[in-house]
Amino acid sequence: MDNASKLRYDKLCTALHHHNYCYHVLDRPEISDSEYDELFRELLALEEKHPHLITPESPSHRVGAPPLKKFRQLRHVEPMLSLENATSAEDLRAFDQRLKRFLSSEADIEYICEMKLDGVAVELVYENGRLTAGSTRGDGQTGEEITANLKTIASIPLVLREPFPPRIDVRGEVYLQRQDFQEMNRLREEEGEPLFANPRNAAAGSLRQLDPAVTASRPLSIFCYGLGYAQGVDYRTHAAMLKRFEQLGLRVNLTQTRVVQGIEQAIKTFFEMESIRDTLPFEIDGMVLKVNRTDLQRELGEKSRTPRWAIAGKFPPRQETTKVESITLQVGRTGAITPVANLKPVSIGGVTVARASLHNWDEIERLDIRVGDTVVVERAGDVIPDVVKVLVKMRSGTETRIPLPKNCPVCNAAVSRIEGEVVPRCQGLTCPARLKESIKHFAAKNAMDIDGLGDRYIDQMLQKKIIRSVADLYRLHPEDLFRFERMGEKLAEKIITAIDQSRHRPLSRLLFGLGIRHVGIHLARILARQFGTLEALSTATEEELCAIHEVGPQVAMSVTTFFADNNNRRILSELKETGVEPGSDVKQSGGVFSGKTFVFTGALTLFSRQQAEQQTEQLGGRAAGSVSKKTDYVVAGPGAGNKLDRARELGITVLTEEEYLELVNKGVSNGSEESNRLF
Ligand code: IVH
């Protein structure tokens, strides 16, 4: 082994761990993203050349582990306790009284108030500064070992900063930001996947993945707040421990943690936290109140499952009770059948709720929900309302169960539920509901963008049987539409022109529009850039597809299955016959926005958000939802608020819509194809 390589390797590892800490824990990067990337690339190159150098803590190991068959169980050295709940100021005062009695002292107790994050509790075991194991809470004694998954979370350090104790088991909450949760659900919807009910479920689902690569693709984060077994540590207060955690490189929510004297101040903090709850980027469901001094914590000790020195002050849930009047089964484009509960309208925190998604049949079975049931519905943040539970005692006996449909509620074709999937799917290829949804998807803004071809017209075209597939759209004449309700000559011509104009959209849009399972707009672009033509993609093998970065076996199979299907092939050849000839997509690396990240905020007036995002991506850039240090430009329209403030704080270049357009026009005239121009 050559010694210089080993030295350089260790240096790179140390540097990367350090910059990771500056970025994720301190929120104060010392180098630019591209400098970081350069160090990272150097590390990968060294690892490839000298594989024996690789250590389990290598910064490259965040995504390296192969999928598991099943999780192992891991025993916590110190049990992971849970917390008693307080639901009112009175409960908190009673807690304080109990402690005073127990301590035989009337003196004000010093408390530390932490936000109660609504995520998944985990334990991280660091031995000699290295992350050697990580697990879920499980039953408190034993959890599931999810080390490889936890290693993919960028804010979890793989090695602690020195000086570290010989052993320290740290507890924290893994969570997803609300916005990332919404984005994740949006993509899942686009790809016909079942939606997650709330950020906590999404975080839990992401952590319990047997394939760490899936966890790595989810933007999870952590806040650490507790200690399990440890050797060589002694903190006088909980606050000092949190501070020390941060020095060790662990991420702690210190900015929103308060040390207070006496219960009244703690109660005040509780209401303050509740009042800012909706403005936070993550969900909290209460405040955790802890006795700050560790000697008092020890004196107070614990009961069988909960410590005596801490309590969770829970915010009143945004819940109401109402009745399930009926259930509608919605059939999506992929045939997925989603049950939706129609509720007796009820107001929850000022918003009227009349429907709630039941997500899937596992959820129906878990809740044992029936038509006629009285249910508790909850609205979490701005998330779709959710049925939390059924009030079984309120049943009259006339409630009816919701059976798994054997046949599609729309076309009556057989319904199948693949082993391991929770979603039953209509198998009818000609199902009108599927057809309608797939035509809507084909014509949608980020697919073929057929302006003016709304739901109403698609419905009528299908009802009057003038179209049977997306290809038929391109055979329509204005006269075909005259028979429609409220359709004049002008409007008919406008729609036909819009259909006409969509013939040469970039290949990525056509691919996305075809609705191949698991191929969202992002993957469609990757495939379009890689293969260039529909013909080339249609003959690609699974191996060729899998060789592409970001394409996994599931996508590869879905693509080859799509192109092997006779019905799909017929539609593709009809599209060709009717003159649909997609334009090419710009290569990402060649685009003028290559490597640049944009955030659009405020009310955009010159173009839609979607247009701007597509344009940015076509020129090689990336459009992100939130402002971070990785953002290069923020494009702000009228009324821009928090994101604009954040951009100014971070010193990011802010552009007006006009300035953005200037950049785009420069980029387009610099050689990108005309067909890629959106505005
Ligand atoms: S302390 C012995 N602190 O709440 C103390 N828990 O109901 C145990 N949680 O399982 C936990 N934020 O998942 C603590 N700042 C915080 C927390 C927190 C969220 C969760 C955690 C725990 C549950 C207890």
Image (spheres, rainbow, N blue to C red):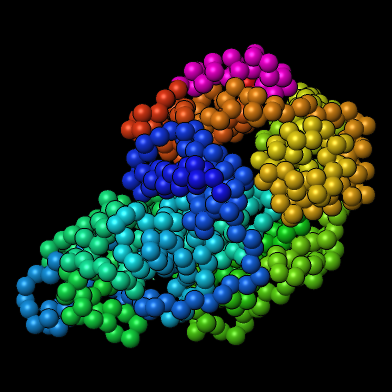
Judging depth in this view, the residue of 541 and 624 nearest the camera is 541
Picture quarter containing residue 72?
bottom right
Say whether residue 442 is visible.
Answer: no
Q: As rendered, which of 205 and 397 lies closer to the eye? A: 205
Left or right: 513, with 281 as reference point = right
Considering only vertical position in the picture, is 279 above or below 196?
above
**Residue 361 vertical placement versus 582 (above, below):** below
Kindly identify the residue that appears in the image at 80 percent across and 66 percent down: 415
The residue range painted magenta reads 656-677
The image position of residue 287, as x and y in percent, is 29, 63
Q: Is residue 512 magenta?
A: no
On the rendering, which quadrant does ligand 1 occupy?
Answer: bottom left
At horizontal 93% and vertical 32% (from top left) the residue drawn is 577
Closer to the camera, 303 or 600?
303
Dominant secondary structure of the residues highlighted in magenta in the image: helix
Is 127 rendered above or below residue 102? Answer: above
Q: Is residue 664 magenta?
A: yes
Q: Position of residue 416 (x, y in %)?
A: 79, 67
Identify which residue is drawn at 56% across, 66% down.
Answer: 208
